[in-house]
Amino acid sequence: MPRTKSLVNLALFVVLLLVAAASGVYAFFHPGPWIVPEAAKQVVNPLKPSQADLPAARKLYLDKCAECHGDTGKGDGPQGKMYDPPPKDLTDAAHMNSVSDGELFYKISQGHRPMPAFRKRLTEQQRWQLVLFLRSLSNSAATGSASQK
């Protein structure tokens, strides 16, 4: 009788371990919502829109972002197809006008699985240049008002 009880306990223990492991894997691959602190949303881009910054930022974008977000920013990059939810369409003016420059900078800097963080890979100026480039993808005329949100 004691041997049967220990087998049942072992089986329960194994089941609990499997449930815990499955929960951990699920949490790892399905992160929660991307929460940006209010203070980060209020940060204003120190760079002014300039045609001089766009070629360098485009090169950065094609090197670091296009694999998921696509060459034109539509969220249709070859790597992006494997993620759920898919990468954002950066050409969607309504969406891009709803986020501030500070929020974009925060997301580029901090990352959020599966998107990597770029605060150690890119300089602060490069990250701000990317924000300007992302704005250009949506042809947003509201750059100033979006940066104040």
Image: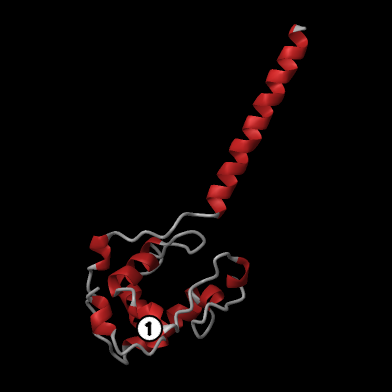
* Residue drawn 33% across the image and 61% down it: 36
State whether residue 34 is above or below residue 62.
above
* Residue 80 spot, x, y in % from top left: 58, 71
Which residue shows up at 27% across the image and 87% down it? 49
Q: Position of residue 99 (x, y in %)?
A: 33, 73
**The residue positioned farthest toward the top in the image shown:** 1
Q: In terms of image quadrants, where is residue 121?
A: bottom left
Q: Quadrant of the N terminus?
A: top right
Residue count near mark 1 (Cα–Cα under 10 Å), binned few <14, some 14–19, many ≥20: many
- For the image, the number of numbered tags is 1
The colouring scheme, among rainbow, by chain, secondary structure or one colour, is: secondary structure
Residue tagged 1: 133
Q: Nearer the viewer, residue 94 or 34?
A: 94
In the image, is 81 to the left or to the right of 43?
Answer: right
| Viewer can see residue 43 | yes
Vertical order, 5 against 50 (above or below): above
Residue 8 horizontal/vertical position (percent): 72, 19
Amino acid carrying label 1: it is Phe
Q: Quadrant of residue 100?
A: bottom left
